[in-house]
Amino acid sequence: MQDSLPQTISLIGMPGAGKSTVGVLLAKLAGLDFNDTDLAIQRHANATLQEIVDAHGYLALRAMEEDVLLTVPLAHSVIATGGSVAYSPAIMQRLRAAGPVVYLQVELATLCQRIAAAPPRGIASDSAHSFADVFRERTPLYERYASHTVTAEDGDPQATAQQILQLLTAAPSAR
């Protein structure tokens, strides 16, 4: 790993932005561990995110997410967060204190195409809200908390991971 890289890099963005896929590749490139917080939540609850939402509601999923993300080790890792982390100032403060927070920005139409092909994702939002509503609600939060924004529109996770690595290597003061 390059000495100029931060020891923790967090990825935020909407479901379908590629946080998990890009995160694994970025961790390999940077020589860091990889931590997918959605998986940590599922292990903690012994249920999928969708099962948590179905059984307990989206607010319970957000509460579990906060519990997990306030305790999960962050050091020496790329952290792929759940899409709803931006609702928690406590989580975002912890992530920002640990290192750069990179917002993977993807247009709504592209996100809709990506998630249409995936199984239900357990999105932590009111069922009365459409995916577009969630996108409009979360985008300003991602923009507020991100120390860097990277467009992940083209669907090339390797190129996105390399772009993040170059950005963070060029900007060590952003730690």
Image (tube, helix red, strand yellow):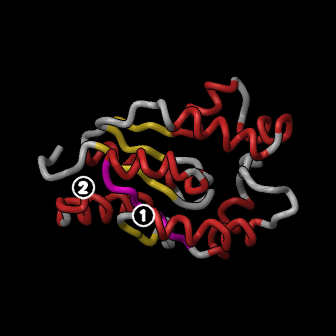
Write down the quadrant of residue 15 in the picture.
bottom right
Q: Nearer the viewer, residue 106 or 87?
A: 87
Residue 101 magenta-drawn?
A: yes
Which residue is under mark 1?
146
Against 132, is 48 above or below?
above
Left or right: residue 161 compared with residue 168: right
Q: Image check: 84 left or right of 72?
A: right
The image shows residue 71, relative to residue 149, as above or below, that is above
**In the structure shown, which secondary structural element does the residue marked by tag 2 occupy?**
loop
Mark sitting earlier along the chain (1/2): 1
**For the residue carrying disc 2, how many other residues have a C-alpha within 10 Å: few (<14), some (14-19), or many (20+)?**
some
The residue depicted at 27 percent of the width and 58 percent of the height is: 165
- Residue type highlighted by circle 2: Arg
* Residue annotated with mark 2: 175
Q: Which residues are magenta?
A: 99-106
Q: Quadrant of the C terminus?
A: bottom left
Q: Give x and y (percent) for residue 20.
A: 50, 48
**Three-letter code, disc 1:** Ala
